[in-house]
Image (tube, coloured by chain):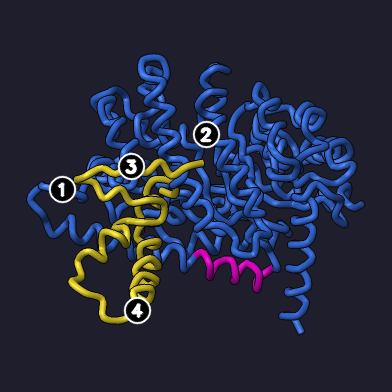
Chain colours: A blue, B yellow
Amino acid sequence: MPETNLEKIYDQKAKRLITAMRNEKPDRVPLRIYAAEFCAKYVGYSIQEVTHDLEKAFFSIRKCARDFKWDGTLTNPIYVWTGLTETIGLKYFKVPGIDLPPDAGFQYLEPEDEEDAYMHENDYDLLIESPTEFLANIWLPRVSKYFLPPGAKNTFSNNMAWLKGGMAMLHYDYKNIEQAQLMKEDSGTVSSVIGILIAPMDVLANKLRGFKQLCIDVYRRPEKVLAACKALQYHLLQNALYTSDPEKKFPVGLWLHRGNLFSEKIFKEIYWTTLKEIIEELWKNKIQTLWYAEGDWSHWTNYVKTLPEKSIIYHVDKEDIFEVYNKIGEKFCLSGGIPNDMLAFSQPDEIKEFCKKVIKKVAKYGGYILDAGGAIQQDAKIENVRALTEAVFEFGQY
Amino acid sequence: MNSNKKDNQGLLEPGPGELIPWDKKKKEYLEITGNEKILEKTWKEIEKIGNRFIWFCLTDS
């Protein structure tokens, strides 16, 4: 029966991924690809189509997963879905087909100065006192075209944005669960990250103060920054637990953004101390964290090394994966490390050769998952993505 | 880790997974004639979904 075969394939893929994530040796090196706008390019959709139309986004990744024989991937390749962002009128994205050409990826608008910031310098105490109320009463009305703050004259648009926003989130969650099942039924592919975590200080840098303002705050009011991160900590843990895998097989995704851009003092005293505790709490709950280190985090490897053994999967983006392996490979599973630049500009035989080198050195004793450094965008050549698959099947058997 | 909750009049101070904490909500009732736990369980279930929406906007979009 085809269903039985696919169930077996799914179980094999899941076991392969889980074994590697526990830093052990599976039957072969797992191929777990996080592809974004590349999926649209592969199936012939515009970026606009997959940003707005969830079904097309889902179909594009299912087709890639099947054709490229991925063991695991994300259910949705595209971070921005306008079913939600347009419903609540989010101001901080530029969207393909609205603000950008249909074939451009979405862009995030960083607040330029204090006036533009979605949280002002004198708002820290409000955030610290009650984070959820701050977000609902102050932050959301500032980032949305429709939400109104308490006390403002109410509008139909405000009421409908709250109603439809909540509905959109439930629809999105439901469709993602359905997509995980469809991936399983279609090609036995595993949804390999379940749940989300953002570092407290990244929340401040990304969505609240903005990076430029936060860089000033860490010198002018470091005690407020630390207190805000501590206030956010427990809520972000709850959010990660709530969205995590009930079976505790697959990790929560921690998408790291700005922590590698601060001095060691700031990193150690604020960023790291408030993030580490969340990862440790997740691990006490038997939940691994995918440490998706966007950019170069090599200068903080000694801090990461202090986390409990196997508590994270360390994903390598711009770092030298061989150096990372030498520093922490005995303690944690590694993933990624295949440069996105190569996928865009190299030739398939160069991709294969590099993958072979990574597999022979980093995956020698297991505990490695093959993937690109960052989410694969539309600049990647299709033949190079195909070469990733071929490399795993040619060189990745144990 | 501590939830860092303080008693602050004027704010509801919802904790993780909350919007209107049950302790505040139940003050609306003059009397609960049946089992309070039954009301509390359902209230908290929906609280978690509502709370998730606020944090979803922050972390997922």
What SS does tag 2 mark? helix
Quadrant housing residue A113: top left
Chain letter of the residue carrying label 3: B
Cα separation, mark 4 vs mark 3, equals 29 Å
Residue A274: image tag: 2
Q: Which amino acid type is shown beneath numbered disc 3? A: Lys
Q: Position of residue A59 (x, y in %)?
A: 54, 64
Q: Position of residue A81 (x, y in %)?
A: 41, 54
Nearest the viewer among A373 and A16 is A16
Nearer to us: label 4 or label 1: 4
With B47 as the anchor, is A337 left or right in this view? right
Callout 1–callout 3 Cβ contact below 8 Å? no
Q: Main secondary structure of the magenta part?
A: helix
In the displayed orientation, state which residue is furthest to the right. A398
Quadrant housing residue A259: top right
Residue B35: image tag: 4
Location of residue A259 with respect to A250 vertically, above or below: above
Cα separation, mark 1 vs mark 3, equals 22 Å
Can residue A165 be found in the magenta stretch? Answer: no
Callout 2–callout 1 Cβ contact below 8 Å? no
Chain letter of the residue carrying label 2: A
Nearer to us: label 2 or label 1: 2
Q: Which amino acid type is shown beneath numbered disc 2? A: Thr
Location of residue A196 with respect to A270 vertically, above or below: below
Chain letter of the residue carrying label 1: A
Residue A99: image tag: none
Nearer to us: label 1 or label 3: 3
Do dots 4 and 1 share one subunit? Answer: no
Q: Which residue in the protein does label 1 denote?
A: A150
Q: Position of residue A209 (x, y in %)?
A: 35, 30
Can residue A178 be found in the magenta stretch? Answer: yes
Q: Which residue in the protein does label 3 denote?
A: B6
